[in-house]
């Protein structure tokens, strides 16, 4: 009768082993939470930068081939100045008229640039770059398109 009773229950060693496995699994999950949170934050910042760059690129592309000059882009509010920051490259602060899409307010030390190159007769390349600072250094998102004179 005693042997039958013993088979129906769990021994102390079995219970301790189960608790140990549960604790080990929980500690792995808890240890991975900070890394997951950091990765999520970096991905969110990268998504914001990509969205700002794409929005700026589409706004410039929407002006058409004839308006892809510094003076016309300045008049449209798509660049900050006709003064270049590099060869054929101009700075921009806002992706549109609202301050919600400001590169500098959405990203740490965020800077946006627009580069316009004449690739061929009746064809221009527009490249929008957004840069910002993180703990691991300067991060960059670059998007581009070609605009033809049709």
Image: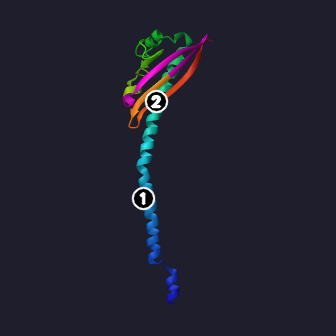
Task: Decide if residue 145 is in sight here.
Answer: yes
Q: Residue at x 49, y 18 (%)?
A: 115
* Residue displayed at 41% across by 12% down: 83
**Residue underneath mark 2:** 140
Provide residue 132's location: percent of width, then percent of height.
41, 30
Q: Which residue is mark 1?
A: 27
Residue in front for this viewpoint, 48 or 108:
108
Above or below: residue 91 compared with residue 45:
above
Helix, strand or loop for disc 2 = strand
Could you say whether the residue bearing mark 1 is in a helix, strand or loop?
Answer: helix
* Quarter of image, res 112: top left
Front residue of 130/135: it is 135
Image coords of residue 58 (percent x, y): 52, 22
Mark 2 touching mark 1, by CB under 8 A? no
The alpha-carbon separation of the residues under discs 2 and 1 comes to: 35 Å
Up-down: is 89 above or below 28? above
* Magenta-tinted stretch: 105-127
Instruction: Identify the image quadrant of the C terminus.
Output: top right
The percent position of residue 10, horizontal first and vertical second, equals 48, 77
Asked if the stretch drawn in magenta spans residue 107, the answer is yes
């Amino acid at each position: 009768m005693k042997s039958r009773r013993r088979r129906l229950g769990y021994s102390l060693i079995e219970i301790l082993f189960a608790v140990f496995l549960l604790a080990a699994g929980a500690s792995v999950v808890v240890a991975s939470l900070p890394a997951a949170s950091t990765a999520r934050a970096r991905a969110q910042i990268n998504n914001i930068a990509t969205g700002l760059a794409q929005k700026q690129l589409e706004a410039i592309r929407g002006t058409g081939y004839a308006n892809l000059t510094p003076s016309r882009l300045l008049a449209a509010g798509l660049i900050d100045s006709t003064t270049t920051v590099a060869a054929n490259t101009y700075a921009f602060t806002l992706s549109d008229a609202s301050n919600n899409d400001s590169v500098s307010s959405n990203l740490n030390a965020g800077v946006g640039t627009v580069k316009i190159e004449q690739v061929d007769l009746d064809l221009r390349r527009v490249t929008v770059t957004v840069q910002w600072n993180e703990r691991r250094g300067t991060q960059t998102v670059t998007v581009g398109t070609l605009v033809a004179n049709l």
